[in-house]
Image (cartoon, grey):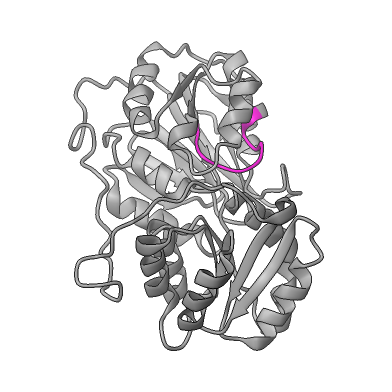
Amino acid sequence: MALGAGNKVRVLIVDDSALVRKILSEALSKDPQIEIVGTAPDPVVAQERIAKLKPDVLTLDLEMPRMDGLTFLRKLMAERPTPVVIISSLVKASQENAIEALRSGAVEVLAKPNGPYSVGDLVDHLCFKIRAAAHARVQRKPMPLGGASRPLALSKPAAPVVPGDDPALHCPEHSLFAIGASTGGTEAILNVMSRLPRNSPGIIVTQHIPAGFSKTFAERLHENCAMEVKEAVDGDLVGPGKALVAPGGFHMLLRWAGTGYRVAVKEGPLVCYQRPSVDVMFQSVVGVARGPVVAVLLTGMGSDGAQGMVALRKAGAQTIAQDEQSCVVFGMPKEAIRLGGAAQTLPLLKIPSAMVAALRNAPVLAGKAW
């Protein structure tokens, strides 16, 4: 998208706390690539200032007076699509609304720390998310039937390729699907996984998402996919018909447990500015895989996953990157393609069937014990 004068990202902060608005404005203004063009205490004022100031990106709280943030987001995406970064509290209802906001058109979500003064702790990460959002492709989304304030029921984006099990799908022993994504990835992952049959091989998923939101994201996937989906716990078994989502704030690695795969969930330094990191997950697969592997890299800002995909392809895995036209941000897939890590580059909705087809042609990887 075209940015403001001097190529700075023009940001409007929408939050009902005057202190939070002040802290965010002062902190974000220190980033030379970001310009704070205004603030708003609620969505009603925000609507007026959007029309006047024409920001590139909004930060949006979900719990506000006069109009809740989710209702405002839906109106915005129906009338004037704009990249939005949600800053939400970690209470259960807010987590669910934040995941719903991603479905409704928001491009990123960040957890609001406890207490207004601690908001400054997330500024470094927020700057990265705002710069990513400025390059996002946002699409107009029609208002839910009954108006913006009507709860939006979560529905499957489409029926899976084959309802239930796919009798034509043969999963060799220890076969694996590995999926990574960032900006725009929650919807992209949903679109891929909801189209995979129940008897798919074990699936491991790393999505850049804050701690506290990954469990809710996994629960939503479970409701909308044929296979079992859960947030990973250290030591969880990886097997057919089951998908594990890396918990926010932790890396997830694949390990060999004598007769099958399990995951290790660990703390550790940020990799490519991320924890969980797609590269960490992909690289761990290279070392331990004992069967066919299909690796998929979806929409996201930055380069996380690209080096890991290169290593997987060199080891014999089938690798697929999402194409530019269907990405919210064509960063991670673009880097994987540039480095030669992607054997195929496909539109999002063609990826699920390609994964199933690739599994039939994937050679067995012979990794060493982790």
Observer able to see residue 58? yes
319, 43: nearer the viewer: 43
Please state the total of marks drawn on the protein image: 0
Q: Give, as a single range, the part of the protein colored magenta.
A: 297-306
| 123 on left or right of 279 | right
Give the vertical position of 212 relative to 3 (above or below).
below
What secondary structure prevails in the magenta region? loop
Observer able to see residue 370? no
Which residue is at 40% across, 29% downward?
347
- The picture places residue 282, in percent across and down from the top left corner, at 60, 31
350, 6: nearer the viewer: 6
| 259 on left or right of 115 | left
Which residue is at 17% across, 37% downward?
163
Give the vertical position of 1 relative to 50 (above or below).
above
Give the vertical position of 312 relative to 254 (above or below).
above
- The picture places residue 222, in percent across and down from the top left corner, at 33, 52
* Quadrant containing the C terminus in the rendered view: top right
Query: Would you say residue 233 sits in the magenta stretch?
Result: no
Residue 361: name its quadrant: top left
Which residue is at 54% across, 65% downward?
212
- The picture places residue 244, in percent across and down from the top left corner, at 45, 45
- The picture places residue 225, in percent across and down from the top left corner, at 29, 46
| 307 on left or right of 31 | left
Which residue is at 73% across, 82% downward?
117
Residue 331: name its quadrant: top right
Give the vertical position of 51 relative to 350 (above or below).
below
